[in-house]
């Protein structure tokens, strides 16, 4: 069941750390078949052969692309149609205090080696405390952890004061009762516009036996099947 829109007004869409615009959708994977007579093919000199009669069409498309402007609210509305889980990304900072943020843009990336990615807003003050440590934890939240999600998503204050959490031996912070927790070492960080695409090497994990996930869809909380 989805919660009403007012469920999110307590913490503010732009301030509380929900990273809703990550680029996790992998369109061209290794199994994408681009063979066939209608595909542009490289020539021996490295140029691309364009089928006769299509140059004008491609020029028109290029002209359309050059004048296209995507409004932020329209983009948010579109990507908000993709339901996803919610996570907490957290670690002990260099002073030994917990720092964390709520993050929607989380994805598995590779099985060999085991890698995950998270997309973090460049303005996140919590990530500024986490990054220098070189590691972080990801807690995949359960449906009953909406208040935890809200608390960690707020800016400033003692986010962890009313939350049960524990730190791993290497300083990753995990939320008690999460569906799963993952220990990560920062592998690489890539530019992603107003976000950072952080690749984490998985160093350890735990999985809860049962439970339903906390979801986020069109600006509302929701729950999934257990």
Image (cartoon, helix red, strand yellow):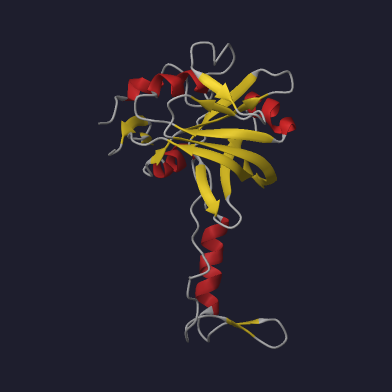
Which residue occupies the extreme left position in the image? 1
Residue sitting nearer the eye, 31 or 50: 31
In the image, residue 148 sits, relative to residue 180, either above or below, namely above
Residue 52 visible in the displayed image: yes
Q: Is residue 136 left or right of residue 17?
A: right
Tell me which residue sits at (47%, 83%) in the image.
38
Place of residue 52 in the rendered image (x, y in percent of width and height, measured from the top left)? 53, 87
Q: Is residue 84 left or right of residue 174?
A: left
Image quadrant where one finds the N terminus:
top left
Residue 69 visible in the displayed image: no
Place of residue 72 in the rendered image (x, y in percent of width and height, measured from the top left)? 49, 38
Residue sitting nearer the eye, 5 or 25: 25
Place of residue 39 in the rendered image (x, y in percent of width and height, measured from the top left)? 51, 80
Q: Dividing the picture into quarters, in which one does residue 185 lie? A: top right
Tell me which residue sits at (40%, 44%) in the image.
78
Tell me which residue sits at (54%, 16%) in the image.
160
In the image, residue 75 sits, relative to residue 178, either above or below, namely below
Tell me which residue sits at (53%, 85%) in the image.
51
Place of residue 3 in the rendered image (x, y in percent of width and height, measured from the top left)? 29, 26
């Amino acid at each position: 069941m989805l919660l009403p829109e007012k469920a999110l007004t307590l913490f503010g869409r732009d301030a509380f750390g929900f990273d809703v615009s990550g680029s996790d959708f992998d369109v061209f994977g290794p199994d994408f078949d681009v063979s066939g007579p209608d595909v542009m093919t490289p020539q021996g000199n490295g140029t691309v052969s364009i089928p006769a009669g299509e140059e004008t069409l491609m020029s028109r498309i290029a002209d359309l692309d050059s004048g296209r402007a995507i409004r932020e609210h329209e983009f948010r509305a579109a990507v908000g149609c993709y339901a996803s889980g919610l996570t907490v990304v957290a670690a002990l900072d260099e002073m030994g205090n917990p720092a964390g943020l709520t993050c929607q843009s989380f994805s598995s990336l590779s099985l060999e080696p085991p890698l995950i990615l998270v997309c973090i807003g460049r303005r996140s003050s919590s990530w500024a405390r986490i990054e220098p440590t070189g590691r972080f934890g990801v807690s995949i939240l359960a449906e009953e952890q909406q208040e935890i999600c809200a608390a960690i998503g707020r800016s400033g204050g003692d986010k962890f004061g009313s939350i049960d959490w524990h730190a791993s031996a290497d300083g990753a912070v995990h939320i008690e009762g999460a569906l799963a927790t993952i220990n990560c070492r920062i592998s690489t960080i890539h530019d992603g516009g107003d976000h950072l695409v952080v690749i984490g090497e998985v160093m350890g994990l735990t999985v809860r036996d049962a439970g339903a996930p906390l979801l986020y869809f069109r600006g509302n909380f929701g729950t999934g099947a257990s």
